[in-house]
Amino acid sequence: MASLPPIDLPTGATGKGSFDAPSAGAPDPVRFDYLLRLGDDSLILGQRLSEWCGHAPVLEVDLSLANLSLDLVGQATHLLEEAGDGDKLAFHRDVLDFRNCLLVEQPNGDFARTIARHLLFSTWQHMLFERLTRSSDRFLVEFASKAVKEVAYHRELSAEWTIRLGDGTEDSARRMAEGIDWNWRFVPELFEVDETLQALIDRGIAPAPHEFEGEYRSAIAAVLADARLEIPADQRAILGGRRGHHSEHLGHLLAVMQFLPRTYPDATW
Amino acid sequence: MSHDWPLWEVFVRTKGGLSHRHFGSVHAPDAELALRHARDTYTRRMEGVSIWVVPSAKITASDPEQAGELFEPAADKIYRHPTFYDIPDEVKHI
């Protein structure tokens, strides 16, 4: 591990504009927070991937990425509807109230960096959802039993691409290595346990991430070995997304995603 | 990128008991990714239960110039067509 302490983004003003969806007063605030964490991960990554639509290197990849995006938006719909009014939570919530991890909000970069982000995230998400099928929470069991199949495909597809780019041309190998390296500092946050998550683990709702951190590290190492890529040196971890302390990128993403329903609140679709 | 990728013909079985049917083609660097491209291109709205991909270059096709000798002789032999009995409506895919 790096000797420097992790960077924890400072607490800013709490975002409570008049347009914000009510987040206080949920009957089970800890469970509500968990639904937001899971739902926001899927929503934000789904939105990021949709930016590739019409821009991917080839038509087939364009469809693949849009397909992953739609799976994730579907997951977010289930999770945010369970948390409350899904549309309000997605489109009328301000950036500081989002609970996604920092990894999913990172810009796409080139195709290799997008694949690197997806490999690092969907491998984690797949291991998490496998365990959520044994949660004490009935909704999460039903949700995860369905979503785990989607995410298994995401994990396999991003591993296949990592291997082909890493073990491809000189240019693709360099880009793939840079993509992994660029996203690597956001991995520790996936295994962070804060007070909220600990409460969920104690109630049997959430799996404890450290139980699969070893499995995760070996799985990523195996893909990188097949791709003839080095495992990056551990970097200074960046934390804070679960508490709403986001990178500057999320605000820009939300500005695009939320523009229409905020500008035309009466619009229906 | 796709200029270097071979073309693959995609065959999809739409449900159990039916044959695989030609759906179209995809570009992909190898068979494994061709299957995934085929899945994402042709079965994303629940159209399939099984996919085959075949390198397009491996397909031997009949010569359009020989269409006359290959196919026309079958056109005027009414006795080759089983048109003299009724097929019940319930029997699909025959």
Image (cartoon, rainbow, N blue to C red):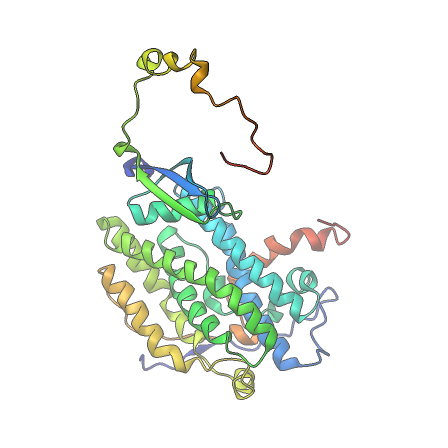
Residue A213 point in image, percent of width and height:
37, 78
Where is residue A177, by image quadrant?
A: bottom left
Q: Quadrant of the N terminus of chain B?
A: top left
Looking at the picture, does residue B38 appear above or below residue B82? below
Looking at the picture, does residue A103 appear above or below residue A157? below
Q: Residue furthest front?
A: B85
Judged left or right of residue A224, residue A189 is right
Viewer-proximal residue among A147 and A5: A147
Say which residue appears at 46% left-offset and 82% top-offset.
A208
Viewer-proximal residue among B62 and A30: B62
Mark yes or no: residue B27 visible: yes
Residue A64 point in image, percent of width and height:
44, 48
Residue A3 point in image, percent of width and height:
32, 82
Mark yes or no: residue A99 visible: no
Residue A103 point in image, percent of width and height:
45, 66
Say which residue appears at 57% left-offset and 73% top-offset.
A140
Say which residue appears at 42% left-offset and 40% top-offset.
B19
Say which residue appears at 56% left-offset and 68% top-offset.
A143
Looking at the picture, does residue A195 appear above or below residue B53? below
Where is residue A59, by image quadrant?
A: top left
Viewer-proximal residue among A174 and B32: B32
Q: How many marks?
A: 0
Q: Residue furthest right?
A: A266
Judged left or right of residue A196, residue B77 is left
Viewer-proximal residue among A159 and A107: A159
